[in-house]
Amino acid sequence: MNPAYALCAAATLAAVSAASAQPLTVVSTSPARHTLAPYTTPISVTFDRPVDRSTITARSFWAFGRWSGAADGVVEFSDDDRTVTIRPARSLSVGEPVMVTVANTVRAADGQFLRPQGYQYQFMTAVRPGRMQFTQIASMTTKSFPEEFTRIYGAAGSDVDGDGWLDLVVVNEVSSDLRVFRNRADGTGLYHPFLTPPTANEYEASPNEPSDFDRDGMADIATGNSDGSTVSIHLGNGDGTYRPRQVVAVGAGPHGLAVLDADGDGDIDIVTSNTGGNNVSLLLNNGLGVFAPPVNFDGGCNGEYAVGAADMDEDGILDLVVGCITSQTVRVLRGNGNGTFTPIGSAAANGSVWMIALGDVNGDGHVDVATSNAGSQTGSILLGNGAGGLAAGVTYPIPGHVVATDLGDFDGDGDLDWVLSSFGGGRWRMYRNNGNGTFAFVQDWTADSNPACAVILDFDNDRDVDLVFTDEIADTIRLMRNNSYCRGDFNADGAVGVDDIFVFLSAWFAGNWLADFNESGASDVPDIFDFLAAWFAPCV
């Protein structure tokens, strides 16, 4: 054999061997991280080489819509088994954050595993155009009798019974329970009276977050309980009821709660920010919805009050964003993917941070932070740079003690608008996004007494996002329907005209999901006929 040829062959084999010894790597996702996607979207992850199909399971590769729940469905393999796709059996809800989780147990066909940290990313579902004009269609109460005082702290929009309609799980501080209002599922946006008996919980329950902690496909919920310094984990039965809760002690005074896969094993863990303990607690999930005692660590600021999870440095590992009420700062802690976190950025919020909301408000593909600033009579917007850094907060006024901040696309223009809730000011305030992360005042709504928060969800399934206002002292829940444009008003200018036909056809020929008028999952010829029927129909 030619010595030069033998040397070349040996080098080639060595290179191939070295390449195959590298961990399996995610090279792209669809939808891409931090983007808007149709609520009918399939969810795909593409790897750098073929995967071992036997390692793709409902626990190792899955997605969860924050309101619609687990996006389980048919799993497909393509591109010589390099791409794995979930086609959800039910559509996601519009305007909701979606978390996609790939566990470190996924293996390549050559035997190499994904990195130990796993891979996790988030995107949001797009919203059909709406008027950004709201009508109150009902007011409900959590009271069983007039004299009862439940003290609503907040609520989760969550499809607790898997029927494709969003229910409400209301968290009450004084009555120490969860009261579940099931959606009537008839398109009215109205709810049945709450289920009785209520689900027992701990006293002074504060933040909440839904997930599927035991991966049985049914929505669960966790609450942080500030008075007892605990977290309650309620595993759903799929009918609006819950199994007996697990209660785990955490640091003193948990006022913030976030969910993420902190250790790469594919199940969802819990983090709390603890104001009294001046620290953060991590609860690791064993995969069955049972949580270990906390690991406590410093949040890197003074008075850790709020916490959220997002991929702030865009490495496929979710990080923590901590809002601090005393130091008036927001701190970013990089997720290392092994249950530990490293501080990487901090910025002045220019207010006493009580709560945070995360999302891309200026359309640059990076996650930003919106805060409510208790005692400061403001909310703040802090822009992220995609590397874990934040710009100093730009403040916007709202009177009183501001306790909640929420982001949602209320007009369907592709950017996130903003709602602040002021307990002391007795009002909810909406700001419209100008498209570049700056905001303009839209309107105030006066509360019955003192707001706890606003819940953003599509409660009538008309593909725009509505509002639910919860009042902490009056114990009332107001349903605010977003008044959609006529379906024939495709360009959302407030009138049905010839321009709508041209805009629709342009979207249809481009394959834009908005042209999927009959919601079949594809833009095809029947959509043209359905659109024209809506265009000729009276505008109601």
Image (tube, rainbow, N blue to C red):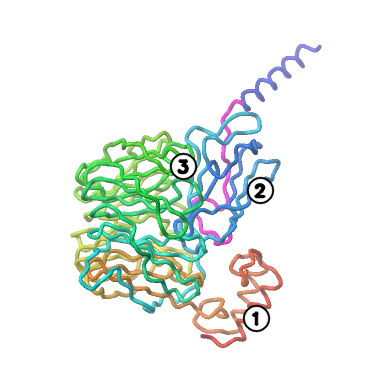
| Viewer-nearest residue: 123 or 1 | 123
Mark 1 lies on residue: 532
Q: Nearer the viewer, mark 1 or mark 3?
A: 3
Return the disc, 2 or 1, that comes first in the chain's sequence.
Answer: 2
Q: Residues within 10 Å of mark 2 (few under 14, many from 20)?
A: few
Whether 245 is among the magenta residues is no
Prevailing secondary structure class for the magenta stretch in the rendered image: loop
Looking at the rendered structure, the secondary structure element under dot 2 is: strand
Q: Amino acid at mark 3?
A: Asp
Return the disc, 1 or 3, that comes first in the chain's sequence.
Answer: 3
Whole-number angstrom distance, CA of label 3 to CA of label 2: 22 Å
Q: Amino acid at mark 1?
A: Leu
- At a point 46% along the width and 76% down the height, the residue shown is 188
Image x and y of residue 233, in percent = 36, 48
| Viewer-nearest residue: 57 or 85 | 57
**Residue 58's quadrant in the figure?**
top right
- At a point 25% along the width and 71% down the height, the residue shown is 145
Q: Is residue 32 above or below residue 375?
A: above
Q: Is residue 241 left or right of residue 8?
A: left
Q: Amino acid at mark 2?
A: Glu
Mark 3 lies on residue: 267
Mark 2 lies on residue: 76
Q: Specify the farthest residue to the right.
A: 1
Whole-number angstrom distance, CA of label 1 to CA of label 3: 46 Å
Q: Is residue 439 above or below residue 45?
A: below
Looking at the rendered structure, the secondary structure element under dot 1 is: helix
Image x and y of residue 112, in percent = 59, 29
Q: Which residues are magenta?
A: 21-40
| Viewer-nearest residue: 229 or 145 | 145
Q: Residues within 10 Å of mark 3 (few under 14, many from 20)?
A: many
